Image: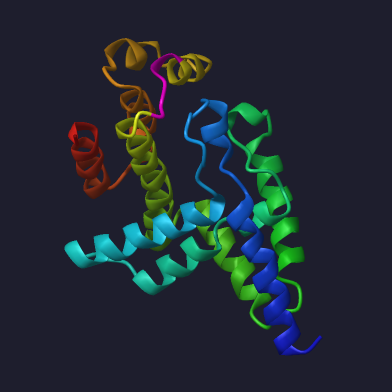
């Protein structure tokens, strides 16, 4: 396959994420007529990364972080957007994801590099992968707050979902539906920068 054909094929595959809706918003019955797509989530992570790079002295290779964030949802071109409600183990999701990414990137000169980059992202051990992982989660928290402020998030729906996995104390202390979402995610953040941002987001009006 010629490079030009590989480029076009890969673009069309990746562009399909513009039409794939994020599963989590369906599961808690966000009432907006138009829900966030996977591609819009990717855009959000990139905007957040660029903004954090603008406002803080980051000890990471921001170009590498951006590449991870651009590519981190490639598997969802083929496999479902699995959530904690899917009943799919982390190991199964990773293996399905590896096969999907391999198929999607077939024909690209940098296929091995892309696959390696996504393995690094999924392991979130290196500084860049840890940072990208936290951006991925923070973008979701920002979107949940946005839905809440716009009146699309129902308290009981979010509470019902959270109680499936415990979180009674979080639900009992929550004032707004997005409070539940943000507090459940709090444990995912290692960097003080993200904890500070989470606190600011919770109080944002």
Residue drawn at x 61%, y 27% as measured from the top left: 85
Q: Is residue 156 above or below residue 54?
A: above
Pinpoint residue 65: horizontal percent, then vertical percent: 41, 65
As rendered, which of 82 and 153 lies closer to the eye?
153
Identify which residue is drawn at 75% across, 57% down: 99
Return the residue found at the far front.
33
| Residue at point 73%, 57% (across, down) | 100
Residue 64 at x, y = what percent?
43, 71
The answer to whether any part of residue 116 appears in the image is yes
Classify 70 as above or below 204: below
Instruction: Specify whether residue 57 is in view.
Output: no
Q: Is the residue 34 above or below the residue 110 in the image?
A: above
**Where's the C terminus, which quadrant?**
top left
Residues 166 and 45: in front is 45
* Image position of 1 (left or right of 38): right
Span shown in magenta: 152-156
Total marks in image: 0
Magenta stretch: residue 204 in it?
A: no
Q: Position of residue 193 (x, y in %)?
A: 22, 49
> Which image quadrant for residue 172?
top left
Within the magenta stretch, is there residue 154? yes
Q: Main secondary structure of the magenta part?
A: loop
Left or right position of 32 against 103? left
Q: In the figure, is residue 1 to the left or right of 117? A: right
Q: Residue 9: name its quadrant.
A: bottom right
The percent position of residue 31, horizontal first and vertical second, equals: 48, 29
């Amino acid at each position: 396959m010629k490079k030009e054909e590989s480029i076009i094929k890969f673009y069309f595959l990746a562009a399909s994420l513009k039409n794939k809706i994020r599963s989590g918003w369906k599961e808690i019955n966000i009432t907006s007529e138009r829900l966030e797509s996977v591609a819009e989530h990717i855009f959000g992570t990139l905007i957040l990364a660029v903004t954090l790079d603008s406002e803080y002295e980051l000890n990471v290779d921001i170009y590498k972080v951006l590449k991870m964030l651009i590519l981190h949802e490639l598997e969802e071109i083929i496999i479902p957007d699995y959530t904690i409600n899917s009943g799919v183990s982390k190991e199964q999701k990773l293996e399905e994801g590896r096969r999907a990414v391999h198929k999607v990137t077939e024909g690209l000169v940098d296929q091995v590099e892309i696959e390696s980059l996504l393995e690094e992202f999924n392991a979130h051990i290196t500084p860049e992968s840890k940072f990208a992982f936290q951006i991925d989660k923070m973008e979701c928290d920002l979107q949940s707050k946005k839905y809440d402020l716009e009146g699309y998030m129902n308290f009981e729906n979010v509470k019902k979902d959270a109680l499936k996995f415990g979180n009674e104390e979080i639900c009992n202390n929550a004032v707004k539906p997005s409070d539940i979402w943000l507090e459940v995610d709090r444990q995912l953040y290692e960097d003080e920068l993200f904890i500070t941002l989470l606190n600011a987001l919770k109080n944002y009006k």
